[in-house]
């Protein structure tokens, strides 16, 4: 495939594709920072630097209709991504003519931030359901008073919770609430407050408990930990109060009946393994098989290999990180019949075609997504311990630091240059006769970068994996790059990035952005959601 054979779609046609009845994978192939500053509402971020690593997971059906885009500065990246996809057998790839600028010129909106559909949905859901909420000040007074039993539940994943949390809060990710809230709050007189870092997961978590019919009073903490911080209240850090791992067997039948009642309310269809196998075999639809349980449970490998881990709360909060094809079929499973129905109830309201799997064992003959491995001809590994000696033997070697740009900006080995896959063809033009050393943390990502170098004529490439103590641990001269401008750090999203790090103005801007999302979408985007009050 050459530049002249790219197939294009114009902005107005792409808008129709997004809202018609057929599947479409709308992929922004710029780096994460570029995507997060300005992108289409339903776009999925799949940076060219990691394209092949996640393509099979996000876009499992090669015949699906695909639309790629970037901006005027990244036309070469979009073309390269299109060629890479066609080389992997994707037969229906198109490029948005004129990029995101043409989209905006056609009168369509673009957005900053991430996980936009889910966050916009949360704002709409709060309004339609009338989800009860409590301010940080009122919660603080309630906790201080002590006259009423109060449980604060943090609905985020454990790593996020450990960064900062409301004092005394217990971590129970939203996808686990249906199974574990009874263990956390056995007394119906306990008031439950669900929080996250901002708004969406507070709302969805609280409304989940209300939809399930728990007897407790339930509130969403307005504006989450950011609202708490803006009220000048102290947060805890590195807490370890986690949800109970075990739920008594005698309670499971009642919990299952409660979740299944919710499934019937939202008319979630149940499918058997043979039906799912026929969907996958016939390749008539994109199918995502999702295990909504915890990391620990998925790690037991008691479900077929084709079923991917998509923790339930995050699947609702960040569907675009797990499902790259709009109008695809999402098939959920767990091993208890309690969590999947609740997750399905929200995904259906988000506008997805969602199903509950009756028998996962029948899918054991389905293969898991293939792991991409570049066919490298001129690349070999170089241990960090041998780097110094290698540089003595090869003083003309290019040191290419592929760690995150902000890490490079803090410090690198003297003489290294920051490199990412989209920049190889331009930044390293004319240097292919030099040996090249790629420095970074992940072998898979560095292998893609090595593939790019080889495609640009490099015939002596070395991959050198480094640890967290790098570059100081390498025993070589070190320099900083404070002069490196933010706009060069295309992999990092600066959009209110320090809202959790002492910048109250950034926190206010983020909350304002989140609450204003609903006013920015058009009627067709709004109609994607189907909230059932």
Image (cartoon, grey):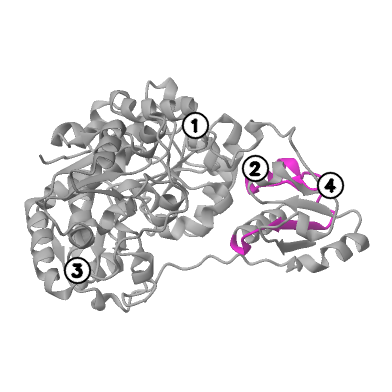
Q: CA distance from mark 2 to mark 3?
A: 47 Å
Circle 2 crowding by C-alpha within 10 Å: few under 14, some 14–19, many from 20: some
Front: mark 2 or 3: 2
Residue corresponding to mark 4: 415
- Whichever of callouts 1 and 3 sits on the residue coming sooner in the sequence is 3
Whether residues under marks 1 and 3 lie with C-beta atoms below 8 angstroms apart, the answer is no
247 versus 440 height, above or below: below
Read off the magenta span: 416-444
Residue corresponding to mark 3: 275
- Whichever of callouts 3 and 4 sits on the residue coming sooner in the sequence is 3
508 is within the stretch colored magenta: no
Residue name at image x 67 percent, y 66 percent: 376
261 vs 14, left or right, is left
The x, y position of residue 57, in whole percent, is 42, 59
- Whichever of callouts 2 and 1 sits on the residue coming sooner in the sequence is 2
Whether residues under marks 1 and 4 lie with C-beta atoms below 8 angstroms apart, the answer is no
Q: CA distance from mark 1 to mark 3?
A: 45 Å
């Amino acid at each position: 495939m050459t530049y002249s054979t790219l197939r294009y779609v114009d902005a107005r046609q792409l808008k129709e594709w997004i809202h018609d009845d057929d599947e479409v994978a709308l992929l922004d192939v710029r780096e994460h920072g570029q995507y997060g500053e300005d992108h289409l509402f339903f776009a999925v971020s799949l940076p060219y630097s990691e394209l092949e690593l996640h393509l099979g997971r996000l876009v499992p059906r090669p015949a699906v209709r695909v639309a790629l885009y970037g901006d005027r500065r990244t036309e070469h990246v979009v073309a390269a991504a299109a060629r890479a996809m066609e080389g992997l057998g994707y037969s229906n790839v198109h490029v948005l003519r004129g990029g995101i600028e043409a989209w905006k010129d056609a009168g369509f909106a673009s957005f900053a931030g991430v996980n936009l559909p889910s966050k916009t949905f949360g704002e709409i859901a709060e309004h339609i359901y009338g989800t009860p909420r409590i301010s940080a000040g009122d919660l603080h007074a309630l906790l201080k008073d002590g006259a009423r039993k109060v449980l604060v539940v943090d609905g985020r994943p454990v790593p996020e919770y450990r960064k900062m949390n409301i004092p005394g809060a217990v971590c129970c990710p939203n996808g686990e609430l249906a199974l574990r809230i009874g263990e956390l709050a056995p007394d119906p007189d306990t008031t439950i407050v669900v929080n996250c870092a901002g708004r969406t997961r507070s709302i969805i978590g609280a409304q989940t408990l209300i939809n399930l019919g728990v007897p407790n009073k339930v509130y969403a903490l307005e504006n989450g930990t950011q609202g708490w911080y803006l009220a000048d209240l102290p947060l805890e850090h590195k807490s370890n109060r986690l949800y109970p791992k075990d739920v008594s067997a005698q309670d499971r039948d009642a919990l299952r009946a409660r979740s299944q009642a919710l499934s019937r309310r939202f008319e979630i269809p149940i499918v058997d393994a043979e039906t799912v196998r026929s969907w996958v075999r016939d390749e008539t639809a994109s199918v995502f098989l999702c295990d909504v349980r915890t990391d620990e449970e998925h790690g037991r490998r008691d479900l077929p290999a084709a079923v991917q881990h998509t923790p339930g709360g995050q699947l609702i909060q960040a569907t675009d990180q797990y499902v790259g094809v709009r109008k695809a079929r999402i098939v959920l499973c767990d091993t208890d019949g309690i969590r999947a129905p609740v997750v399905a109830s929200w995904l259906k309201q988000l506008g997805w075609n969602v199903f509950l799997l009756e028998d996962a064992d029948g899918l054991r003959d389905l293969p898991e997504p293939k792991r991409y491995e570049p066919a490298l001809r001129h690349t070999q590994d170089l241990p960090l311990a041998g780097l110094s000696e290698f540089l003595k033997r090869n003083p003309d070697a290019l040191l290419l630091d592929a760690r995150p740009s902000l890490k490079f900006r803090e410090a690198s080995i003297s003489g290294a240059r920051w490199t990412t896959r989209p920049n190889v063809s331009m930044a390293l033009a004319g240097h292919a006769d030099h040996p090249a050393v790629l420095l970074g943390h992940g072998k898979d990502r560095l292998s893609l970068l090595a593939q790019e170098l080889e495609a640009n004529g490099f015939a002596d490439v070395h991959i050198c994996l480094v640890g967290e103590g790098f570059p100081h641990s390498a025993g070589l001269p070190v320099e900083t790059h404070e002069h490196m401008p933010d706009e060069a750090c295309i992999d990092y999203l600066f959009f209110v990035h320090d809202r959790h790090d002492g910048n109250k103005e950034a926190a206010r801007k983020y909350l304002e952005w989140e609450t204003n999302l609903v006013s920015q979408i058009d009627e067709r985007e709004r109609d994607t959601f189907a909230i059932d009050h």
